[in-house]
Image: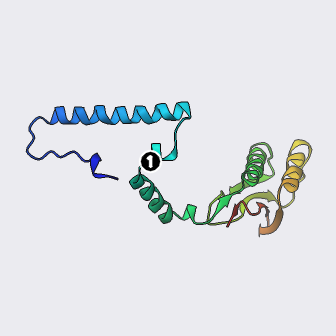
Amino acid sequence: MGCNNVIDIRGRKNMEKIIGEAKVKAEAEFQAKADKLRTGKFGFEDLFSDDDIVTILERAEQNKFFKGRCVDISRVQKYDKIKKLAQWLDCHCPDILGIVIGGITSRQPHAVVSIDVRRLSALRGRPLQAFCMLFSLSDNVFLSGINGDMIRFSFSVEYVYKA
């Protein structure tokens, strides 16, 4: 940021007046930028100074989220449907022992939702339809035995984040 945002208070006694003037100036600058945004008649340089742009780019370089990765929105929507179906099953099916929602992170290209099911269970009606929808929505399904009484179904959506 530039030096014009700094208030020099050395040798001044009337601080309330100085702070009030700075507040009025900041509000006027904000209002001018807000008006430009509302009208749509502005250039990038109208909103950000050169120092602002340098600061934004430096922060982006430090943030791993911006390191060459982009999210595929259609994949995220697919993952959200899987997550909602798993949450619905957890609430409405007594044979579901629990769910694990992996979440979406920029460090992992894939997103996973896991459902723990009783080993001897029979799904009927709506829960069976929801389970079938989970299979059809996911890119991969993994089965693993947690213990003698439980089987874990893991539904994944691949390449949510791409390099």
| Residue 28 place in picture, x, y as percent | 35, 32
Depth check, front residue: 51 or 133? 51
Q: Is residue 31 left or right of residue 72?
A: left
Picture residue at 8% right of the left edge, 44% below the top: 11
The amino acid sitting under disc 1 is: Phe
| Residue 74 place in picture, x, y as percent | 76, 51
Q: Can residue 125 be spotted in the picture? A: yes
What kind of element bears circle 1?
Answer: loop
Q: Colour scheme used in the picture?
A: rainbow
Q: Is residue 101 left or right of residue 129?
A: left
Q: Is residue 42 left or right of residue 83?
A: left
Picture residue at 32% right of the left edge, 52% below the top: 2
Res. 24 image quadrant: top left
How many other residues sit within 10 Å of disc 1, few (<14), some (14-19) or many (≥20)?
A: few
Q: Is residue 88 above or below residue 71?
A: above
| Residue 10 place in picture, x, y as percent | 11, 47
- Which residue position holds label 1? 48
| Residue 62 place in picture, x, y as percent | 47, 65
Res. 91 image quadrant: top right
Question: How many callouts does the rendering have?
Answer: 1
Q: Assign the C terminus to one quadrant of the image.
A: bottom right
Depth check, front residue: 86 or 23? 23
Res. 100 image quadrant: bottom right
